[in-house]
């Protein structure tokens, strides 16, 4: 897999506003936030897209969701609610090919449209 900008953030070669870090996962604020809270939850291991997740990585994906849950609570948006999004490939508008989950909240979000 080609190295992405997220590898550099994971390796602390590029700065980011990191809100969570552990042995398997790093989370940092999106450089172009779409809402008052917009955090990217990223596994350290290089997985390009959802299509590349292997069955033995199911626990890691679960940890990404639990990390999002914790950050939402820390950010004070758990009660009002939020959205978790993983974009995949061209039709999903994926830009960075290192798996990541968007945690978006802090305002009323619009419903997901077909377009
Ligand atoms: P995607 O479209 O791949 O799901 O989302 C990639 C996200 O990464 C975008 O929301 C974009 O704003 C964010 N992003 C791209 N480059 C950087 C960066 O260098 N730093 C941070 N913090 N976010 C980035």
Image (cartoon, rainbow, N blue to C red):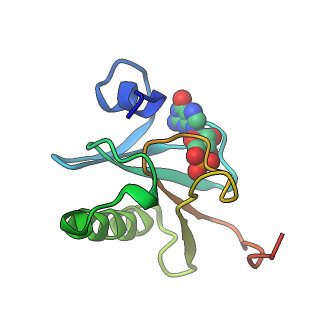
Quadrant observed for ligand 1 in the rendered image: top right
Q: Above or below — where is 15 with respect to 20?
A: above
50 left or right, relative to 47: right
Q: Position of residue 81 (x, y in %)?
A: 56, 78
* Residue ID at (15%, 46%): 23
* Residue ID at (39%, 64%): 68
81 left or right, relative to 109: left
* Residue ID at (56%, 57%): 88
Q: Nearer the viewer, residue 64 or 98?
A: 98
Tally of marks: 0
Q: Position of residue 67 (x, y in %)?
A: 32, 63
**Which corner quadrant holds the C terminus?**
bottom right
Q: Nearer the viewer, residue 73 or 69?
A: 69
Q: Position of residue 26 (x, y in %)?
A: 32, 45
Q: Nearer the viewer, residue 70 or 115?
A: 115
**Which corner quadrant holds the N terminus?**
top left
Q: Position of residue 89 (x, y in %)?
A: 59, 52
38 left or right, relative to 74: right
To which quarter of the image does residue 18 belong? top left
* The furthest residue to the right: 115
Q: Above or below — where is 97 with respect to 76?
A: above
Q: Above or below — where is 101 with respect to 96?
A: below
63 left or right, relative to 50: left
Q: Nearer the viewer, residue 79 or 34?
A: 34
* Residue ID at (48%, 67%): 76
């Amino acid at each position: 897999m080609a190295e992405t900008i997220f590898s550099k953030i994971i390796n602390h070669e590029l700065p980011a506003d990191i809100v969570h870090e552990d042995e398997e996962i790093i989370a940092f604020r999106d450089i172009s936030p779409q809402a008052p809270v917009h955090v990217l939850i990223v596994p350290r291991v290089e997985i390009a897209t959802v299509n590349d997740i292997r069955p033995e990585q199911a626990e890691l994906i679960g940890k990404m969701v639990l990390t999002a849950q914790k950050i939402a609570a820390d950010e004070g948006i758990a009660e009002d609610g939020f959205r978790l999004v993983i974009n995949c490939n061209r039709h999903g508008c994926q830009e960075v090919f290192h798996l990541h989950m968007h945690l978006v909240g802090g305002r009323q979000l619009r419903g997901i449209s077909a377009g």
